[in-house]
Image (cartoon, rainbow, N blue to C red):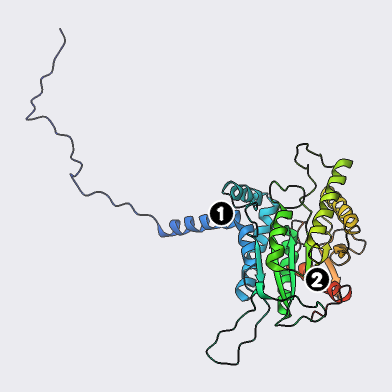
Amino acid sequence: MSDLIEVDDQHAPSAPSKRSGPRPSTTINWQRLLGLMAATLAIWLFIDSTTLQHNAQVSPVGIRRTIALDLLGPVAALSRVTQVSHLESWANGALGRNGNGSGGGESLTIIMPPVQKRTTTGHPPIHPAITTIPPNSMQSPTATDPLRVLLIGDSLGIDLGDALQNRLAATGVVVAALDAKESTGLTRPDYFNWPAELTSALPKVNPQVIVVMMGANDPQAIPGPPGISYGTAAWDVAYRHRAVSFMRLATSEGASLIWVSLPPMQDAALNAKVQHVNDLQRSAAAKVPKVIYIESNQVIAAPGGGFSAFVTKDGQNINVRTPDGIHISPSGSNVLAASVIHTMRKQLDIPVP
């Protein structure tokens, strides 16, 4: 027989009520909350730094843009070194932001030259519409009949394009359009199809001069079928063919093409691959009329053509490369941009101010 304990319900202790007393307040230290917000912002800034840098690069010229580029430059360089930028590119691809098969031109940004205000009061300044600019002679660009230039490239092309776009627009007689995307090239049209992008950009800009700098991402297998491994003779043939086709497309409407070689890299293995790509691009340029090939190592490299973070110009040491040993610093980009403009003046006979 089991022992049973009888409980008097009337005298049994009752369960504590959920509302038996005031609930203790929960507070968060404002300093901890501020620190959490700052850390979240820093993580977001680091992950998205390359996109933010590109957005700043294609924004209107001004103090705000200059400050943004100065702040984002080192962060974006670190993002590329640590490969975080590839994570961002992958995420954008998963969200459908990398493709350019549906019309393209998403990265195309046009900066018009400075405009003089109308003398009549009450009317805002007006830029000539890009779609209504008539064909002109490259030998006499003016503010009302500007030279049209299209700048194309990967992340190194962005380095050059940022400086070149600003310098050209500042002349007052050039419409400069920047169409660039990092981690791209001619090897992987499945990721970003540059021929399709160029086909879309040509009628929008109707360029008279096109400047291209890309290829650092190209030393990799060409996807199939059949796939072609990098380092083989078949790869060289296929890549040179792609470069020739792209150059012919760029000049198909009468534009002159300036192709800028990739600068030397600090890492010896990467530098060997990049110089090989340069050799193939150089030989492709020799096969296509109206293509001028510029050697970047003549202006942003050591005297012997090797990698150097600094060059001497007019008696001053100029930092021309970023800490990752790959990209071009703002100062180096300005030096290289000046070389491109010099080529426009001397080899294309364009009187760019």
The spot of residue 340 in percent (x, y) is 82, 70
Give the residue type that dot 1 points to: Ile
Q: Nearer the viewer, residue 15 or 331?
A: 331
Q: Nearer the viewer, residue 64 or 206?
A: 206
Q: CA distance from mark 2 to mark 1?
A: 33 Å
Sort mark 1 into few (<14), some (14-19) or many (20+) by Cα contacts within 10 Å.
few
User: Taking 22 as reference, is 34 left or right?
Assistant: right
User: Taking 196 as reference, is 56 left or right?
Assistant: left
Label 1, on which residue? 43
Quadrant of the snapshot with the C terminus? bottom right
Give the residue type that dot 2 points to: Val
User: Are dots 2 and 1 in contact, CB under 8 Å?
Assistant: no
Say what secondary structure mark 2 lies in: helix
Quadrant of the snapshot with the N terminus? top left
Of the residues under marks 2 and 1, which one precedes in the sequence?
A: 1
Rendering quarter of residue 221: top right
Rendering quarter of residue 156: bottom right
**Residue 245 visible to an observer of this rendering:** yes
User: Where is 223 relative to 265, above or below?
Assistant: above
Sort mark 2 into few (<14), some (14-19) or many (20+) by Cα contacts within 10 Å.
many
Residue at x 80%, y 56% (from the top left corner): 246
Label 2, on which residue? 335
